[in-house]
Image (spheres, grey):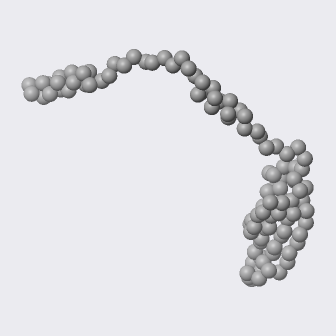
Amino acid sequence: MQSWLVISLLFISSFTFTTNDPVREVSDHSMAALATKEEKAVPAFVLREPLELKVILNTYENDDLVNTKEKTETIWAMEDFWARYDGWVVEDQRIGQITFKKELKIT
């Protein structure tokens, strides 16, 4: 009998502690419109011409530098560029230049 009383009191109290605030309508959406306009105002950075990048390839053998090649790459698609240097590790990267390294394992 007491458990039913406790359950019924909890049930009734759950209704009394909930708020029945009506949903408020917002008439001024200026902040939402402003945020949307600002997001659209950010320009996209797209190159219409290929990227020219100086590529330096360092080859190491037992932690000793044995060979260095420098060349200028014309890059139309970065996916193709990264695929071309698969197996190489980026050693240094600066604006207009990237240096890769590869360790040769000689046994």
Residue 15 in percent (x, y) is at: 26, 21
Q: Horizontal placement of 9 versus 104: left or right?
A: left
* Quadrant of image for the N terminus: top left
- In the displayed structure, would residue 66 be above or below residue 102? below
Q: Horizontal placement of 73 versus 95: left or right?
A: right
Residue at horizontal 83 percent and vertical 70 percent from the top: 57
Residue at horizontal 45 percent and vertical 18 percent from the top: 24
Residue at horizontal 51 percent and vertical 19 percent from the top: 26
Residue 17 in percent (x, y) is at: 26, 25
Residue 91, quarter of the rendered image: bottom right
Residue 88 seen from this side: no
Question: 64 or 92, which is in the foreground?
Answer: 92
* Quadrant of image for the C terminus: bottom right
Residue 21 seen from this side: yes
Residue 98 in percent (x, y) is at: 80, 64
Q: How many labels does the image show?
A: 0
Residue 84, quarter of the rendered image: bottom right
Residue 43, quarter of the rendered image: top right
Instruction: State the residue lying farthest toward the left.
Output: 1
- In the displayed structure, would residue 63 be above or below residue 39? below
